[in-house]
Image (cartoon, rainbow, N blue to C red):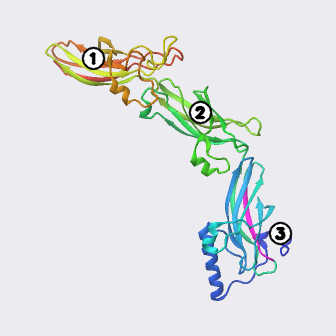
């Protein structure tokens, strides 16, 4: 862990040679600086002939180990430099910079000066430093190549990234949540639990592709993402996501985050397409969908055999009749995202309505409401939804 020149001394305290003089020394320092800029940089050389290089990488790898990588070269001592690793000021390893680094060939004309080691480190916050050890038979001194900090833990880590209810999922479907999770002790996927308003709701496995996570944690790979819909009743909720620690490894479960969600899940939706009139009547036409009516069955049978929609009308706030969705609207079904069961087997895509109102002379406010069907299995409810209003003068 120390050169024979410096014996018991810290590498950074090695004896220093006199400072460079003349054009040759200046050119030497320029070349050293160019090498450090091109490859990520390191400490300045400690006098002419001192090693130079960089500490490029300090990262956590599976098994609560720390990967340490960089490069080092001694300009006047072939062939390779000894690199000493210190963690929190204590020497822990001595390695030799012999690994092929193609990027170094761009500035040094040679490539075999990389170093890499994997060390088991106790949990906690640590400072990792590497030193290039000068050859005792050549000028120069030992050089600090760089220091980086790292946090080591047995606890799962991750992120609760998103809560989303995109238009493509239809207004009445469940919001989606997404994120990622890793147990630092293992490469295996992590179990994730979802709580809604303090109650356990769903369990999933974080095994979906997340290339961004794989780039940040290359030793773990990118199969550590999760994304899933969360069933919510309409209204405000708190959604919390936990990453579960592997039972065979040290550590505990970890709360990734909680998010406030204003859900429109299960809420009926629709549109008034057209309003026409004759001297005696006003005709209102449109369509509407209660998401659950298309997805549940009142008894044994295939999905998509639920009841037709019911539309209620008001004139100046007073009830003015109801109709059922008896009109096929293939255009509505064609516009829904793939995989949504927006059809009724044997009954066609009956989401359209047409209703005629007899209005007294004067100006009136007319509204159309689609009624909600409570889900027979879960009991999830949502308010009836007004899908449109208009003012009409007779």
| Part of the protein shown in magenta | 126-135
Q: State left or right for residue 356 relative to residue 150.
A: left
Judged from this view, the residue extending furthest toward the front is: 346
- Point out the tag, 2 or 1, that comes first from the N-terminus: 2
| In front: label 2 or label 1 | 1
Q: Secondary structure at mark 3?
A: loop
Percent position (x, y) of residue 201? Answer: 60, 26
Q: On the image, numbered disc 3 is attached to which residue?
A: 2
Q: On the image, numbered disc 1 is attached to which residue?
A: 354
Q: Secondary structure at mark 2?
A: strand
Percent position (x, y) of residue 373? Answer: 44, 15
Percent position (x, y) of residue 18? Answer: 73, 84
> If the image is split into quadrants, where does the N terminus sit?
bottom right
* Separation of marks 1 and 3 at Cα, in angstroms: 89 Å
* Separation of marks 2 and 1 at Cα, in angstroms: 44 Å
Q: On the image, numbered disc 2 is attached to which residue?
A: 240
Q: Secondary structure at mark 1?
A: strand
Instruction: Give the main secondary structure of the magenta stretch.
Output: strand
Was residue 129 drawn as part of the magenta stretch in this picture?
A: yes
């Amino acid at each position: 862990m120390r050169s024979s020149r410096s014996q018991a001394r810290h590498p950074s305290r090695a004896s220093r040679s006199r400072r460079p003089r003349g054009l040759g020394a200046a050119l030497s320092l320029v070349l050293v600086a160019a090498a450090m800029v091109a490859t990520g940089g390191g400490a300045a050389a400690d006098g002419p002939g001192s090693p130079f290089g960089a500490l490029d990488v300090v990262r956590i790898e599976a098994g609560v180990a720390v990967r340490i990588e960089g490069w080092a070269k001694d300009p006047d001592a072939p062939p390779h430099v000894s690199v000493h690793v210190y963690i929190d000021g204590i020497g822990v390893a001595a390695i030799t910079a012999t690994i092929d680094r193609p990027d170094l060939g761009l500035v040094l004309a040679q490539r075999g000066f990389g170093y890499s080691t994997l060390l088991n480190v106790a949990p906690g916050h640590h400072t990792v430093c590497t030193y290039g050890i000068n050859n005792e038979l050549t000028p120069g001194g030992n050089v600090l190549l760089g220091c980086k900090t790292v946090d080591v833990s047995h606890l799962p880590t991750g992120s609760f990234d998103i809560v989303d209810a995109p238009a493509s999922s239809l207004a009445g479907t469940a919001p989606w949540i997404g994120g990622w999770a890793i147990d630092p002790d293992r490469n295996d996927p992590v179990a994730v639990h979802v709580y809604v308003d303090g109650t356990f709701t769903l369990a999933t496995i974080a095994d979906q592709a997340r290339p961004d996570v794989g780039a940040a944690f290359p030793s773990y790979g990118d199969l550590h993402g999760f994304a899933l819909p969360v069933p919510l009743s309409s209204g405000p909720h708190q959604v919390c996501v936990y990453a579960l620690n592997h039972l065979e490894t040290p550590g505990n479960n970890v709360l990734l985050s909680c998010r406030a969600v204003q859900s429109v899940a299960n809420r009926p939706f629709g549109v008034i397409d057209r309003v026409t009139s004759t001297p005696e009547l006003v005709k209102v036409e449109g369509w509407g969908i209660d998401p659950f009516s298309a997805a549940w069955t009142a008894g044994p049978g295939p999905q998509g055999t639920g009841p037709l929609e019911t539309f209620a009308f008001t004139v100046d706030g007073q009830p003015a009749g109801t109709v059922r969705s008896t009109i096929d609207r293939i255009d509505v079904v064609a516009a829904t995202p793939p995989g949504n069961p927006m059809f009724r087997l044997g009954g066609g895509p009956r989401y359209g309505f047409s209703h005629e109102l007899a209005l007294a002379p004067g100006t009136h406010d007319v509204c159309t409401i689609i009624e909600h069907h409570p889900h027979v299995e879960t009991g999830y409810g949502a308010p009836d939804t007004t899908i449109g209003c208009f003012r009409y003068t007779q």
